[in-house]
Image (cartoon, rainbow, N blue to C red):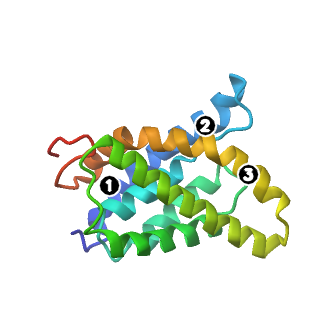
Amino acid sequence: MRTQFKDLIIPLIITLLILIVLEIVSTALLPAFGVQKYIIPFNILIVLYLGFKLETPFLAVLILIVQYFHSFFSIEGWELGTIAGVFICIVISYLRDVLHFSSAIITITVTQIFQLIWFVIVSSLFYLKTNSFTLIVEKMWRFVPESIVISLLAPFFFAILDKIWKTGGEGMLGEDV
């Protein structure tokens, strides 16, 4: 367990650089190839990883930083994602002993479940803000394929982040890290 913020700075910078590259690919290159309606939410994958793997009192600050960097590439504000991310990480902290990522299938399934929770939280907050279901329904149809892609990428992405954050234990694909 890393308790000092200085121990988190280098892995956080590397993670943010990866996020920036992935956001550029998702927001600039995918539309250039004709995929205009879908943007892969890599920020959610990073926040879920932080919640699953890190036990630090600075987790909320890390989530805020990730969401803030994500907001440079999205019209969605950082505040809704930060609230959803912190809430989900609180739930994860209670379920941490039950969650074991022993296989890629389990990782994909757990990631998909928490993405659904993320969507419900953000949609509820958005509804409270706008008092309209129209945009939520439209976003739901885009959310389904985006969340499936993110869930399928989760085992590989988590394995990369395991190396960056140096989280010990069993890796996402069953190997020792």
Residue drawn at (56%, 62%), measured in percent from left and top?
118
Q: Nearer the viewer, mark 2 or mark 1?
A: 2
Q: Label 1, secondary structure: give it.
A: helix
Rounded to the nearest whole Å, what is the CA distance between mark 1 and mark 3?
34 Å
Q: Which mark, residue 26?
A: 2
Q: Label 3, secondary structure: give it.
A: helix
Rendered location of residue 116, percent (x, y): 56, 58
Q: Earlier in the sequence, mark 1 or mark 3?
A: 1
Q: Which mark, residue 10?
A: 1
Residue 99 position (above or below residue 107) = below
Residue drawn at (56%, 46%), measured in percent from left and top?
147
Q: Amino acid at mark 2?
A: Ser
User: Which residue is labeled 3 in the image?
Assistant: 139
Residue placed most toward the observer, 43 or 169:
169
Residue 69 position (above or below residue 88) = above
Rounded to the nearest whole Å, what is the CA distance between mark 3 and mark 2?
17 Å
Locate residue 155 relative to residue 38 in the image: left or right: left
Residue placed most toward the observer, 69 or 132:
132
